Amino acid sequence: MAHVSKCVINTYRFYIDYAIQNEIAMPTPIPKEIAIIGDGYAAAVMALHLLRRGISGSSIALVGPRVPGKGNAYSCASSFFRLNVREDLPIIFSEDPLHFARWAENNVNDPESKTDAGYFYRRRDFGDYVTQLLQGTPGAMQMEHVAARVKRLLPADGHWIITLEDGGNLCANQVIIATGNAPPVWPCAVTSSVQSSARMVENPWPGNYLDGIPRNDHVILLGGGLTALDAINALAGQDHQGMVSVISPRAIFPPVQALWKRSKQPQFPQDLSPRRLVRFMRNYLPQVSTDSVQWQSAWEELRPPLNAVWQQFSPHQRRRLLKRLGWIWSLYRFRASPQTIAAYECLRARNQIQFILGRAKQITCSESKVNVLMSSGSELVGDWIINCTGVGSDPLAHQLIQSGIAAPDALLQSIAVDADLRVINPDYQSHPNLWMIGPATMGSLGDVVASSAIAKQAEQLAQEIAK
């Protein structure tokens, strides 16, 4: 395997000694050929494409506590959480881009999905699609599903030892990290008791908390992106009558999706710097409304070449670009479904929406109220607070970096990978049998957030492994 630092070897030897002294069960001497860490969308499409490439299901272990396929993003309890893209854009099979659109037409009963910009289906329906797709793939029933969270990943004699939170262990010759978006965490200091914590929603994605919010309560949304709009759509659907306060640095939501279409390919200049890239994009975009078909078509024409441009930049340039363009990118890259924007406009027309400009510094929760101390020194008091910031923390990525197994990416947010999705160690050498796919590769590879981009990574990696 690739060069491993003395720190890593010593860490593993310490682990072996500790396990023997404390009578902890060690891994089976017969390793699994491939272990996929994760149980959400990225892990499911990775397993699916491996099976389609002829890799035996009995040689694959899927490691994660939940039913594979849905994860945080698509295991929604709320029927108001919708995809923010129309039905022809979630592409799992490059040779059959309309597979999901056909499946939804035949399997989903959702009259409210239809809009002038296309069909925007419920996220939980897309989760059902992914789960059924995996389960129906030949060989899937022979895969081993290890229903536990991964605590630690360490190299040993050419393979990998996966330590589980339940105390068990798994051994694998090849490991693919497909954990998806990092679990949400509060972006500031939080003080609450066990009794009061029900009023604080740290992970907003399931939506199972919404039914329990009394219709006249004051709800605080921490963050002003698509997740906040999901909550607004659900509250409006429940005929919420109380105030909704949105804490955000800017009083603006992403624009509504239009029925855009790419019609041409822009010619990017050579030798781009972050500043020249921003100038080129600004000049390419038409001077019309950002929710128009014309503007969004131009924006989408710019997107496909950007990953190659991103990968040419140095780590310093990437950080500069993100600092300068990051919030604008998030605003216009992640546009909202027409249903969620309609819900926002409904609450705004009833004077139930207010923006609180700035950032939260500290959150204090009692049994009856939530108090938010702003960085400006002002305070906001409400009944509920929902974390919609998108800030997350991945314990496995932290462990791999701290153990000297992986190098941090350019944005210092995850671990670095090369163009072949192999994890890079601190000496900037690629592990030959450790890969990562999904949103966590963004710092290294660029815009890898959409379901179609993740599926394309899985498809390419499966083809490489099958060789």
Image (cartoon, helix red, strand yellow):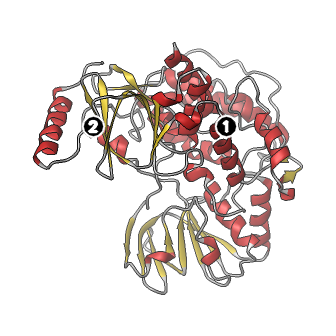
Residue labelled with disc 2? 27
On the image, the x and y values in percent for residue 159 come to 31, 25
Q: As rendered, which of 400 and 321 lies closer to the eye?
A: 400
Q: Is residue 35 in view?
A: yes
Residue 229 vs residue 430: left or right? right
Q: As rendered, which of 207 and 247 lies closer to the eye?
A: 207
Residue 119 vs residue 435: left or right? right
Is 371 drawn above or below residue 53 in the view shown? below
Amino acid type for the residue under numbered disc 1: Gly
Q: Residue at x 59, y 14 (%)?
A: 270
Q: Residues within 10 Å of mark 1 (few under 14, many from 20)?
A: few
Amino acid type for the residue under numbered disc 2: Pro
Q: Residue at x 48, y 33 (%)?
A: 441
Is 160 drawn above or below residue 219 in the view shown? above
Q: As rendered, which of 201 and 299 lies closer to the eye?
A: 201
Q: Residue at x 56, y 18 (%)?
A: 463
Farthest residue in the top direction?
A: 467
Is 408 drawn above or below residue 271 in the view shown? below
On the image, the x and y values in percent for residue 93 come to 70, 28
